[in-house]
Amino acid sequence: MDKLISDFVYIGAGLAITLQLLVGSFLMGIVVGSLLSIIRVSDISKICTFLIERVISVIRGTPLVLQLSLIYFSVPGILDIKLSALSAGIVAFGINSSAYISEILRAGIESLPQGQFEAARTLGIPKYYMWKDIIMPQVIANIYPAMINEIIALLKETALIVTIGGMDIMRRSQIIAAERYEYFAPLCIAGAYYYLLVVLIEFIGKKIENRKIKC
């Protein structure tokens, strides 16, 4: 029993890394993804739109573990900088998430009636306020379930940080398993932590959604 409790505590210490990866990469993904989607639907430049679409296609069409490896192993040599596993993870997961969030936001924007854009232009509302106060609040309400799913998917993808030595939940369970040649219990503990996080995200998401419906 003591061994099981100590395993729970040791593996649970990886929550800090897992949550930092999740929050950091999601914030990066939502910021970059929003900018990409706005540029695409605004059609500011056909060349710019074409390049963004090709970049998104490449990001979505290649394995995340490949992108993580490129950022951690190749970028420091090219740019002569040093990246920690956590920093590389946030950048890699954030860039990958931004491609998917961009597609979700684009679909949400295109689902809105075009009359809203035309009315805003007719009234002379600056584009910044049009997007901030009129368009994006409606888009976020429409794509809310898809964004919760993206957060959950991103949480599970953070386990790939083990490939570059990040001491997250998964890595700590692997260390215990390797030391004892006993894989079942440590991996089940890691799975329990991930599952509890997913349940917590779903619970918070539903609470926020229900509050918005009541309002």
Image (cartoon, rainbow, N blue to C red):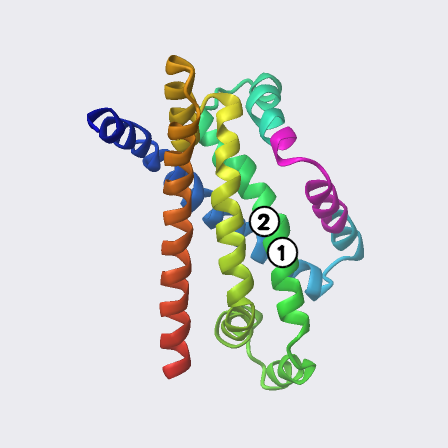
Residue displayed at 66% across by 58% down: 103
x, y percentage for residue 7? 29, 27
Q: Classify residue 211 by image quadrant.
A: bottom left
What is the crowding at mark 1: few (fewer than 14 residues within 10 Å), some, or many (at least 20)? many
In the image, taking residue 136 as reference, residue 102 lies left or right, namely: right
Furthest toward the front, the residue is 1
In the image, taking residue 13 as reference, residue 71 lies left or right, namely: right
**In this orientation, which residue lies closer to the viewer: 144 or 48?**
144
Q: Is residue 59 magenta?
A: yes
Furthest toward the left, the residue is 2
Q: Is residue 167 magenta?
A: no
**Which residue matches tag 1?**
102
Residue type marked 2: Ser
The image quadrant where one finds the C terminus is bottom left
The image quadrant where one finds the N terminus is top left
Secondary element at tag 2: helix
**Is residue 167 visible in the rendered structure shown here?**
no
Please report contact status of discs 1 and 2: CB closer than 8 Å, yes or no.
yes
Up-down relation of residue 201 to residue 116 (above or below): above
x, y percentage for residue 67? 63, 32
x, y percentage for residue 158? 49, 37
**Which residue matches tag 2?**
98
Residue displayed at 41% across by 43% down: 194
Residue type marked 1: Ser
Q: Main secondary structure of the magenta part?
A: helix
| Residue 212 circle label | none
Up-down relation of residue 28 to residue 181 (above or below): below
Magenta-drawn segment: 52-67
Residue displayed at 57% across by 47% down: 97
In the image, taking residue 10 as reference, residue 19 lies left or right, namely: right
Residue displayed at 38% across by 48% down: 197
